[in-house]
Image (spheres, grey):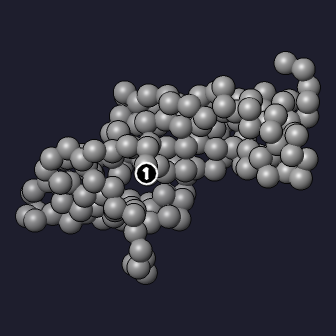
Amino acid sequence: MQSKVRTCIAFKDQAEEAARFYVSVIPDSVFEGVFRLQPDAPALLVSFTLAGTPYQALNMGRAPSHNEAFSISVMTKDQRETDALWDKLLAGGGAEIECSWLKDRYGIHWQIVPDALPRMFTDDDRAAAGRAFQAMLGMRKIDLAAVEAAFRGDAP
């Protein structure tokens, strides 16, 4: 069934390439299809799903202005998955930002967030939550063991 609501990400001319890349990186994702004005023409609109969330990518013919006002957030189960996604999304010209954020080679911003982070940040022990949050602020890619140590109050 076609989703009623999809987030549309604009590209100059890399919509299909980016969508295929994202589908290859995010587990349980599907490249759904391409709309072309002519059979041999470049893609105009691409439909894909990332881990159950529907997206479309549009080639605008001019460079859009991507910024951190839009990001794709991916929850990860552990450090291994965090590291793998982080490295794959940075491949080919991405840039680390801070606090679990990165920008991929297409200019799209991502947040790679271990599942444990929001649990720690919303814990009833507000001092522990604050220590975990402060530890995260000094990181680019999340070091889950270091954030958990701060949460527990373990000395660095």
**Residue positioned most to the top:** 156
Quarter of the figure with residue 136: top right
x and y percentages locating residue 24 in the rendered image: 45, 47
Give the left or right position of residue 127, taking residue 44 as reference: right
Q: Which element is circle 1 on?
A: loop
Within 10 angstroms of label 1, few (less than 14), some, or many (20 or more) residues?
A: few
Instruction: Name the residue at 24% across, 62% down.
Output: 45
125 or 49, which is in the foreground?
125
In the rendered image, which quarter contains the C terminus? top right
Q: Is the residue 82 above or below the residue 12 in the image? A: above
In the rendered image, which quarter contains the N terminus? bottom left
Instruction: Name the residue at 80% across, 39% down.
Output: 130
30 or 6, which is in the foreground?
6
Give the left or right position of residue 119, taking residue 60 as reference: right
Residue 148 seen: no
Q: How many marks?
A: 1
x and y percentages locating residue 60 in the rendered image: 18, 54
Q: Is the residue 147 above or below the residue 8 in the image? A: above
Instruction: Name the residue at 66% across, 31% down.
Output: 137
155 or 51, which is in the foreground?
155
Give the left or right position of residue 111, taking residue 130 as reference: left
Residue type, mark 1 in image: Phe
Instruction: Name the residue at 64% across, 44% down.
Output: 113
Residue 122 seen: yes
Quarter of the figure with residue 34: bottom left
Mark 1, residue position: 70
x and y percentages locating residue 116 in the rendered image: 77, 46
